[in-house]
Image (cartoon, helix red, strand yellow):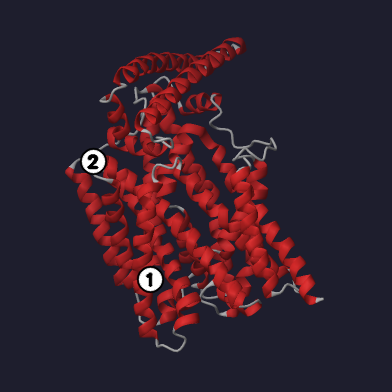
Amino acid sequence: MHPIDWSIIAIYLVWIVWDGLRLTTRSHEIEGYFLAGRSLPWWAVGLSVMATQLSAITMIGTTGQGYADGMRFLQFYYALPLAMIILSVTLVPFFHKARVYTAYEYLERRFDAKTRAFTSLLFLLSRSMSLGVVISAPAVVLAVVLGISVTSTVLLIALPTAVYTMFGGVQAVTWTDVKQMVLIVGGLTASIVVLVLALPPEVGIVQALHIAGATGRLQTFDFTFDLSNQYTFWSGTIAALFLFCSYFGTDQSQVQRYLTARSVDEARGSLLMSGYWKIPLQALVLLVGVFVFLFYLFTPGPMLFNPVHERAVREGSRAGEYAALEERFEAAAAARREAALALAEAQGADDALRLDAAGQAFKAREVDVRAIRSEALTLVRDATGDRTYNDVNYVFPTFIMRHMPIGLVGLLFAAIFAAAMSTISAELASLSAATVIDFYRRFMRRDADDRHYLRVSKLATGFWGLFASAVAVWAAELGSLIEVVNRFGSFFYGSILGVFMLAVGVPRATGTGAFIGLIAGMASVAWVARFTDIAFLWHNVIGAVAVVIVGSAVSAVRVR
């Protein structure tokens, strides 16, 4: 990488840490440290909510998803605006009026201490594991760029973020998030511009999108009802509704964001802002992936995008097989390129039969290329023993390193750093808050002063940073990172949501009913995940329904 690009990254990292600490005030008070004194404007909170979601996973994993699978993943977000409306009239006013630090404090007031503690414990487990995946995304990028171990890159990205979160609190997190969102959107927009300019002169934007559409990569609606299919209209509007209600309504990393707002109305405004801008932003990210596919359609690219695994096979005992596959891939890619150009030319002709024939020929060549890539992936898995190998997370970093102009390489890597740091810092702050408020202050030291709690909070932040880093070391190779983080969350989110549904919607629910219902919900999800092929998005529905049914039944028995 060019020294100019390294300079851009270094300047960004130093500036964002310094600026976050510079703007921090009232971090010596427990309310100021965790909730910024409940004084932040709605637009800053809204951007912080969006920045927390738009992690480096989005920059790397979602662009890779767009390259491999197109826009289908957008269906995952269709329920988001509805979820934000539901939360704005239910849990948001509950939390604000209760003047709580964490979402789980409310559960003790409504039920009992054991329900609060168990729910908070589930949050700590799910969020710390998900944070490990969030850290692993930029670690993948740095490992490719620097040629060093993933462990080293994990520590390089996680530890500086933990430091400014430890000292700056949630106010530093929020104001750095605002600036990072600007950089992230700017980096994505610059990528689209470069990719469009890289199209062949004879292929316009409309023609390119038509070619992508011929492969199914522009499909944003799939109305088939199949519980084993991850991304359909129904999973995105029913199953994902439960996920979003749980994530934004009961996950401390999000609840803590809107508890910093000045009022209930401003908290609602921040959620609605995020709900209605998230889908266009996610479409932009996926579209970058689609254009990367189009770029490599017309520009010769690698058969596999992970240079480490590729080198291991190329230099190993199965090098001959890999070389033969590479020859076949180059020939198939060349044939696909010619078919794509023919399809682009046919679009300008007033001949439906010619257009249809060109489309069929291109789709056949695309199938050939995908089949060879699949063989190559299988060969790598067999040769390295890594049965989970998938190179989708390396697609966008490879494009950046090989084809982006000097300066923009540094800008995009800085944007990936920004995406990582905004999410890592927010989630570390929430993990620290839940640890100190729900466990340490509740069960160990109930009467200490703010100085003591702040000291423990900083230690908790450091602990969770190290724990998440350990998870990150192995998370990078689990497949598409955007799916991995949602798979982690879906194992817990439905059950946690079910407890809050009991608290708000079932007046006769008891603490014992909620506690047993929570256990039943987790057990139901574990059984479904182990013994069925039901897509993970539906785990949120299963967990929530199980908690409500069992919790209501147990409560009814106890009442009688």
Residue nearer the viewer, 344 or 308:
308
Circle 1 residue: 460
Residue nearer the viewer, 357 or 421:
421
| Marked residue nearer the N-terminal end (1 or 2) | 2
In percent of width and height, residue 374 lies at 45, 25
**Amino acid carrying mark 2 in the image:** Gly
Quadrant of the snapshot with the N terminus: top left
Q: Residue at x 32, y 21 (%)?
A: 318
Q: Residue at x 31, y 29 (%)?
A: 310
Residue 120, compared with residue 196, is above or below; it is below
Within 10 angstroms of label 1, few (less than 14), some, or many (20 or more) residues?
many
Q: CA distance from mark 1 to mark 2?
A: 32 Å
Asked where in the image residue 180 lies, by quadrant, the reply is bottom left
Q: Secondary structure at mark 1?
A: helix
Q: Residue at x 34, y 15 (%)?
A: 324
Circle 2 residue: 147
Instruction: Please indicate whether residue 267 sits to the left or right of residue 2 in the image.
Output: right
In percent of width and height, residue 31 lies at 44, 80
Image label count: 2
Can residue 499 be seen in this snapshot?
yes
**Amino acid carrying mark 1 in the image:** Ala
Q: Residue at x 44, y 45 (%)?
A: 481
Can residue 27 be seen in this snapshot?
no
Instruction: Please indicate whether residue 414 sits to the left or right of residue 375 in the image.
Output: left
Quadrant of the snapshot with the C terminus: bottom right
Are the two marked residues, 1 and 2, in contact with CB atoms closer than 8 angstroms? no
Kindly give the residue lying farthest to the left in the view shown: 3
Residue 510's tag is none
